[in-house]
Amino acid sequence: MIRVTVGNPLELKQPDGTVLNTHVRSIEMILGAAPERACMPLLLGEDLTKADLPAGSELWFEAHTNEMIQYHFPASTLSTLTSQLFTPDGSGHLRFGNSAVTFLPASIDNLTAGALEFKDELTTYLLTMTPANDRVTLSVGLLGLKHDPVVLPQIDASLHQAGITFTRDA
């Protein structure tokens, strides 16, 4: 799960495409009658007004992790690699490997625009892809897991299962 703290920078993306930069000024926790009804209202920067938050606006956080692992795919094109690794499902989410799925609905294009949060039964991690002239890099950030011995072998197995040649930074 992404950790949000007071002072975190964020982007407010309005429906017309306007982007405003602000920050988290305060956080409140509200518990409902059931755990799935819990919510976390955020008080945003003092520079915003109600008019800056029209219906349909989105808040984008820059997620950070303490540990980033880089996978490198030589001589791969981004479109070929993404079609081998990620499968859109009927609900608008992306699937990766045997069990990981994006936390929020997402498209393949979102992988190069920023990090996507994937969850499986036990773990949460961020994935982002960066194309270069001679290779594509998949960055994996572990969220809330310092050195989980299961995540990297699971990702390695998904890549091997897809028949993809790669190297991984230690």
Image (cartoon, rainbow, N blue to C red):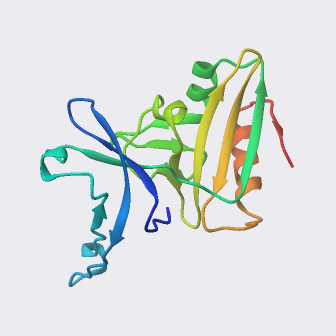
Q: Is residue 146 above or below residue 131?
A: below
Decide if residue 55 is in sight here. Answer: no
Judged from this view, the residue extending furthest toward the right is 170
- Looking at the image, which is closer to me, 63 or 69? 63
- At a point 26% along the width and 79% down the height, the residue shown is 30
* Image quadrant assignment for residue 27: bottom left
- At a point 70% along the width and 48% down the height, the residue shown is 155
- At a point 62% along the width and 20% down the height, the residue shown is 80
Q: Position of residue 65 (x, y in %)?
A: 63, 57
* Image quadrant assignment for residue 39: bottom left
Decide if residue 31 is in sight here. Answer: yes
Q: Is residue 163 above or below residue 9?
A: above
The number of callouts visible is 0
Judged from this view, the residue extending furthest toward the front is 47
Q: Position of residue 112 (x, y in %)?
A: 54, 31
- Looking at the image, which is closer to me, 31 or 121? 31
Q: Is residue 95 above or below residue 125?
A: above
Judged from this view, the residue extending furthest toward the bottom is 33
- At a point 67% along the width and 42% down the height, the residue shown is 139
Q: Position of residue 103 (x, y in %)?
A: 43, 53
Q: Is residue 27 above or below residue 68?
A: below
